[in-house]
Image (cartoon, grey):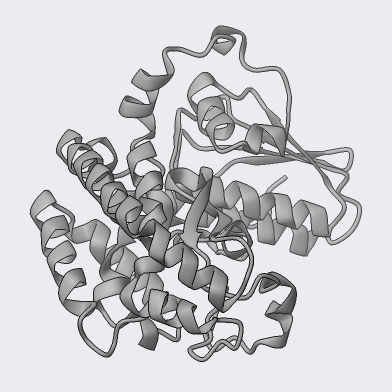
């Protein structure tokens, strides 16, 4: 059964209230957009009565962050329509991507293809099949991150005591704040900052107006920010503990803005391209007036500009610009 007179680029079949989608060999942004459109079409034409949707990965050997995003969006469609979602014939390379982002615990996955029951060497596969941007596998960039991470942590250790005292005197409570963010390919990690808000900031979030369009949340005069916190954000000192995340490889010195899981839950497929690189302590958004960014589309534009222009020299230029920005009145927290 076909949905239209012109067959879609991705094959489907229907039988007994169930639909099977045969996934393409690669699932990158173009195929992912088509797949999302197909899912939307299926549920539009079958708003009720579709008991199961099966995704057959027999032919699929590669997917990037956009492909992951399309799977998450498909799962959202299924949840909204109370349709069971099943992944079958998932090969080792696709399974590796799902497992390293913990999506293997979210999706119901049938037995893998017989010839794919054992995962090959994980580091080799990550380098060869999963890398979606040259910055991810650049040894020079990683070396710079290690040197920068160690240097940054040394500076952080020097500043720790006075910053800790200032935070505690201004608003007694924890010195550090942690939050789950998403790294390359959607991997979740715990980011660390010096606390710049009141202790119960998360509970008060619904009382603060969001001044940014889209899934981001920001308020230039957020009342939850403490007096010391405003200074820490102005100077970006609150972000110094993230040098630990850089040293661990969860972040880079330069990259994209690290999103929260709640943010990416609202992404459409094109926005998932931001996750093709590691998030950074600084990046295009930091040197392009981060306090003035009011639209999510602008964040996407800056992130994609970074990916298109990336080189080691470009990273160095952005780091130099970041230092200069910190001494202007336009600096501030993102």
- The percent position of residue 314, horizontal first and vertical second, equals 12, 59
Judge whether 215 appears above or below 188 on screen. Answer: below
**Nearer-the-camera pick, 164 or 247:** 164
For residue 307, which quarter of the picture?
Answer: bottom left
Residue located at (71% from left, 49% from top): 75
For residue 87, which quarter of the picture?
Answer: top right
- The percent position of residue 287, horizontal first and vertical second, equals 24, 75
If the image is split into quadrants, where does the N terminus sit?
top right
For residue 329, which quarter of the picture?
Answer: bottom left
Judge whether 172 appears above or below 279 on screen. Answer: below
- The percent position of residue 282, horizontal first and vertical second, equals 29, 63
**Nearer-the-camera pick, 6 or 8:** 8
Could one spot residue 62 in this view of the protein? Answer: yes
Could one spot residue 6 in this view of the protein? Answer: no
Residue located at (53% from left, 54% from top): 181
Total tally of numbered discs in the picture: 0
Residue located at (35% from left, 67% from top): 237
Judge whether 186 appears above or below 232 on screen. Answer: above
**Nearer-the-camera pick, 53 or 311:** 311
- The percent position of residue 296, horizontal first and vertical second, equals 46, 77
Residue located at (47% from left, 60% from top): 193
Q: Is residue 59 left or right of residue 44?
A: left
Q: Residue furthest left?
A: 313
**Nearer-the-camera pick, 27 or 231:** 231
Q: Is residue 97 left or right of residue 28?
A: right
If the image is split into quadrants, where does the C terminus sit?
bottom left
């Amino acid at each position: 059964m076909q949905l239209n007179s012109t067959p879609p680029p991705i094959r489907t079949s229907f039988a007994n209230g169930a639909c099977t989608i045969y996934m393409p060999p690669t699932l990158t942004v173009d195929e992912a957009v088509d797949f999302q459109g197909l899912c939307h079409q299926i549920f539009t034409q079958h708003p009720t009565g579709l008991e199961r949707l099966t995704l057959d990965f027999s032919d699929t050997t590669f997917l990037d962050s956009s492909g992951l995003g399309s799977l998450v969006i498909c799962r959202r469609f299924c949840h909204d329509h109370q349709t069971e979602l099943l992944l079958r014939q998932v090969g080792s390379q696709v399974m590796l991507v799902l497992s390293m982002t913990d999506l293997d615990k979210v999706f119901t996955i049938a037995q893998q293809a017989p010839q794919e029951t054992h995962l090959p060497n994980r580091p080799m596969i990550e380098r060869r099949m999963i890398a979606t941007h040259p910055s991810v596998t650049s040894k020079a960039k990683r070396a710079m991150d290690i040197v920068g991470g160690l240097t940054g942590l040394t500076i952080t250790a020097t500043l720790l005591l006075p910053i800790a005292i200032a935070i505690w005197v201004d608003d007694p409570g924890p010195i550090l704040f942690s939050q789950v963010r998403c790294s390359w390919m959607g991997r979740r990690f715990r980011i660390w900052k010096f606390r710049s808000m009141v202790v119960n900031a998360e509970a008060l979030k619904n009382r603060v107006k969001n001044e940014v369009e889209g899934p981001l949340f920001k308020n230039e005069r957020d009342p939850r920010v403490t007096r010391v916190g405003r200074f820490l954000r102005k100077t970006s000192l609150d972000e110094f503990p993230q040098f630990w995340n850089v040293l661990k490889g969860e972040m880079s010195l330069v990259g994209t803005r690290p999103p929260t899981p709640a943010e990416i839950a609202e992404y459409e497929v094109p926005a998932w391209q931001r996750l093709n690189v590691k998030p950074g302590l600084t990046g295009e958004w930091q040197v392009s007036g981060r306090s003035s960014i009011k639209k999510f589309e602008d964040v996407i534009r800056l992130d994609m500009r970074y990916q298109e222009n990336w080189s080691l020299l470009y990273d160095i230029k952005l780091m130099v610009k970041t230092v200069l920005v910190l001494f202007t009145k336009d600096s501030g927290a993102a």
